[in-house]
Image (cartoon, rainbow, N blue to C red):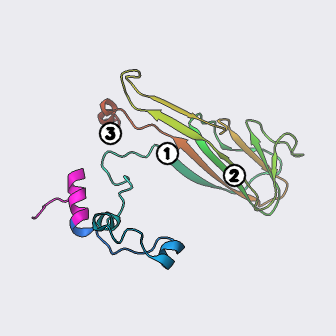
């Protein structure tokens, strides 16, 4: 049975996996490597184990709500604080790494001073990381427009840097939560 566009639907994906996606069983753990598969007696289970899993990221309706950006920061001053990131209420991830050679003073919502008081002091190659999260509730009867939150221990304040040694560099990674647009907004975003 020929299928001209095998990936045009979920059914098409299943058909394509049936026709093209099988691979022979291979051990996944040390136990399976030593003892073999526990399902060799059950051919229908073995057949399903031979199909690759669909992670969903190539499904046309999937939209990843998280965006991550990495910044390389050079020429950090020894006297004037550098505002490396502006405040961001949608921030869900933050990583600051001192690439050296000097100490890096990191102020979160405050500008560091030359003494490094009331700020984080990162020595060369040290990393500071905040991992937060976000919640997106799609439109439903209770929330007709949907609901989104970015929260969980990730500072939304601006990030400011200062160093005690010239030519000290840093790397900053910021992740933010962008809820998927509502179906009524998708056309407006592409037009504007």
Residue 161 in percent (x, y) is at 75, 47
Relative to 129, say whether 133 is above or below: above
Alpha carbon of mark 3 to alpha carbon of mark 2: how far? Answer: 34 Å
Disc 1: which residue: 66
Mark 1 vs 3: CB contact within 8 A: no
Disc 2: which residue: 96
As drawn, the label of residue 174 is none
Q: Locate the N terminus by quadrant.
A: bottom left
Alpha carbon of mark 1 to alpha carbon of mark 3: how far? Answer: 19 Å
Instruction: State which mark lies toward you, 2 or 1.
Output: 1
Is 174 displayed left or right of 139 in the figure?
Answer: right
Residue at x 39%, y 55% (from the top left corner): 55
Decide whether residue 149 is among the magenta residues. Answer: no
Residue at x 28%, y 64% (from the top left corner): 44
Could you tell me which secondary element the residue under label 2 belongs to? strand
Instruction: Single out the residue that lies furthest toward the top.
Output: 142
As drawn, the label of residue 190 is 3
Could you say which is closer to the camera, residue 112 or residue 17?
A: 17
Q: Earlier in the sequence, mark 2 or mark 1?
A: 1
Instruction: Single out the residue that lies furthest toward the right.
Output: 115
Q: Locate the C terminus by quadrant.
A: top left
Residue interval drawn in magenta: 1-18
Residue 177 in percent (x, y) is at 51, 40
Mark 3 vs 2: CB contact within 8 A: no
Relative to 30, say whether 73 is above or below: above
Could you say which is closer to the camera, residue 53 or residue 143?
A: 53
Task: Tell me if mark 2 has few (under 14), some (14-19) or many (20+) residues whose alpha carbon lies within 10 angstroms of its own.
Answer: many
């Amino acid at each position: 049975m020929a299928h001209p566009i095998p990936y045009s639907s979920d059914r098409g994906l299943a058909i394509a996996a049936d026709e093209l996606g099988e691979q022979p069983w291979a051990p996944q753990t040390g136990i399976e490597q030593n003892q073999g598969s526990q399902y060799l007696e059950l051919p229908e289970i073995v057949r399903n184990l031979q199909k690759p899993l669909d992670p969903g990221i190539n499904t046309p309706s999937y939209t990843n709500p998280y965006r991550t950006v990495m910044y390389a920061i050079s020429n950090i001053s020894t006297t004037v604080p550098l505002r490396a990131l502006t405040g961001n209420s949608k921030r869900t991830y933050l990583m600051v790494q001192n690439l050296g050679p000097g100490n890096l003073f990191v102020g979160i919502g405050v500008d560091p001073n030359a003494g490094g008081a009331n700020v984080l002091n990162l020595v060369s190659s040290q990393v500071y990381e905040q991992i937060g999260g976000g919640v997106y509730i799609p439109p439903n009867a209770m929330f007709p427009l949907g609901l989104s939150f970015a929260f969980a221990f990730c500072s939304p304040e601006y990030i400011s840097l200062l160093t005690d040694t010239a030519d000290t560099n840093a790397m900053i990674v910021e992740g933010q939560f962008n809820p998927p647009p509502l179906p009524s907004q998708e056309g407006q975003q592409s037009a504007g």
